[in-house]
Image: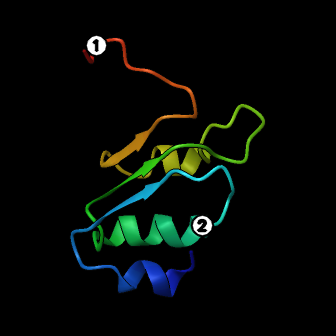
Amino acid sequence: MKKAAFFALKQGSYFINMPWRNFIDKAALEEVLNTGHIAGAALDVGQAPDQMPTPSLAVTSERNHNAPYGSTNPTID
């Protein structure tokens, strides 16, 4: 997903990335988050060997949720 596609999203939208492939432009996602055009992002996996999202995306915004494939939250019933 490229910059133009991110900015084509309705303002206030949330971006949820769940595929096992890397198809997003990370710099474009950072930009669209930093401008406030989208309300937040949830990232499932990254390209790193441990499947963690790109570190800069993990800390770009308090509105991000990062949950690598197979992660769980024991506080959720």
Residue 20 versus residue 74 in the image, above or below: below
Q: Position of residue 58 (x, y in %)?
A: 49, 44
Residue drawn at 52 percent across, 50 percent down: 18
Q: Amino acid at mark 2?
A: Ile
Determine the image quadrant of residue 23. bottom right
Q: Residue furthest right?
A: 49
Q: Secondary structure at mark 2?
A: loop
Q: Is residue 73 above or below residue 43?
A: above
* Residue 42 vertical placement versus 70 (above, below): below
Which residue sits at x=74%, y=41%?
48
| Distance from Cα at disc 2 to Cα at disc 1 | 30 Å
Specify the quadrant of the image occupied by residue 52.
Answer: top right
Q: Could you tell me which quadrant the N terminus lies in?
A: bottom right
Amino acid at dot 1? Thr
The residue lying at 60 percent from left, 66 percent from top is 24
- Residue pictured at 43% horizontal, 52% vertical: 60
The first of marks 2 and 1 along the sequence is: 2
Task: Name the residue tied to disc 2.
Answer: 24
The C terminus sits in image quarter: top left
Badge 1, how many Cα within 10 Å: few under 14, some, many 20+?
few
Q: Nearer the viewer, residue 64 or 14?
A: 14
From the top left corner, tell me how far across and down residue 3 is, in percent.
52, 81
Image height of 66 relative to 61, above or below? above
Q: Residue furthest left?
A: 12
Residue 34 coordinates in the image, percent (x, y): 37, 66
Query: The residue tagged with tag 1: helix, strand or loop?
Result: loop
Disc number placed over residue 49 in the picture, else none = none
Query: Looking at the picture, how far across and down is residue 71, in whole percent?
Result: 51, 25
Circle 1 residue: 75
